[in-house]
Image (cartoon, rainbow, N blue to C red):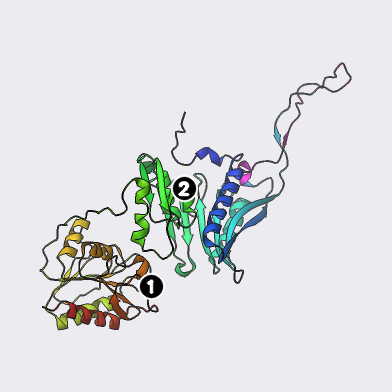
Amino acid sequence: MPSPFPGMDPYLENPAGWPDVHHRLISLIGDALMSRIAPRYYVTIEERVYLVDDGDPARTVIVPDLRIGLNLSEPALWSSAGGLAVAEPIEAITMLDPEIREARLMVVDAANREVVTAIEVLSPTNNVRDGAGWKNYRHKRQEILDSGTHLVEIDLLREGDSPTAAQVPGPCEYRVHVSQVRRRPRGWSRAVRWYSALGGMRPDFVVDLQGLLRSALMAKFCCGKMVVGLSDAREGARLFYRRIARTSPGEHAVVRYRRCLPLLGVPDRCEFFIPSGTAPAIPPGSVVLHPFARGAGKSLDAGAIRAFVTEFQAKSKRRVVVVGAGNPPASLPAGVDNLVGKTSLPELIGVLRGARFVVSVDSGPMHLAAAIGAPLLGIHTWSDPRLVGPFNQEAWIWQGGEIRLQDFAETPPAQRPFTPESARETARFVVEKTRG
């Protein structure tokens, strides 16, 4: 009969089977990474070594090296041939080897031999409170968090006191925690709380366009008949794909995503329908400003937002509509329609369709505006517009203090922050483009 547990088999946590599972996971993840990061980086397997004793609370999750026994309740019997008959044994756990070894992956910069990322796949011994493995893991973990090394923790265990629980409180099946040096003490964590719901979907196809470990796990947990992904997926995501769409370096994201379509039996030049939207009542001919993005360093700060609005209103009578999901400045000038956090997706599409001009940071609404053909200026602080910019060569790009038409072949200028002065320059550009 099929397993009653969709996804990962919980019986793999059995002490007798887990060491083999752990070694195979470490090896597979390492091989997948090497195929993507060489020759600039390479992957090594490092061991954490610690000692245990008879009183260690994790003894129940450690496999003994040997089991022997002797049934003392029955007398030994001599055989007719003069040898000692074998008695029925009793089972007893022998003294464990006090040295425990647990493997982890280290990503190393080939140029200077420095470790840039540590990848841990947690073992049951790491989740038993006050055990030697629990203490050793937390000590080594803190050493990494205090260093210049990124940390990735993969916790596929259902039992125990997980060190990632502080980042992902509450009950959940599995956890993945990523701590990037530049974002500490913050990091991102994902609790797979939607695991059971995803397992009941069972679609014909699951397409992973993000190409990261978390998105590949989501695709796998859906229990679809086929998981399709991209050849340049990262973090070992390709391990979960059944079919892989081949991509080429330097391709725009839209071109890369389209390469999945033939694997699904769909022509790669098909048209995608975008609804007309249901715009709220805003003045016709307005300029729409979308200043928010989830990516670090992409959103405009309060000073830049105010500078754009103030400069634009000083030179144009058109209304400014601010949209998106974020934290707008505490006070916006009069004459600004503040729709931040107040539009559904259909309403946002309607606003973009009715705009005279759209100014947006690199984000989903920017791509929506490009897809529907709205006059657009996309603000790129650090992302490469050749790869993730508006897929519309009539769109304008701000980057590095320059404004130019989108050109997928042109090397972008050096990165610069989008300052209040940049906002005023952009506002004057939009005034010129919306005259008449």
Q: Nearer the viewer, residue 410 or 28?
A: 410
Overall secondary structure of the magenta section: loop
Residue sitting at 74 percent across and 24 percent down? Answer: 88
Which residue does the image show at 35% across and 46% down from the upper left? 264
Q: Is residue 146 above or below residue 78?
A: below
Where does residue 129 sit, x and y in percent of width and height?
Answer: 56, 50
Q: Which residue is mark 2?
A: 240
Image quarter of the C terminus: bottom left
- Tell me, for residue 382, which label it has, or none: 1
Magenta highlight on residue 83 = yes
Q: Is residue 67 magenta?
A: yes
How many marks the image carries: the answer is 2
Q: Nearer the viewer, residue 328 or 218?
A: 218
- Residue 417 at x, y percent in the picture: 36, 78
Q: Nearer the viewer, residue 57 or 234?
A: 234
Pick the front one: 180 or 58: 180
Q: Residues in magenta? A: 57-85
Observer able to see residue 425: yes
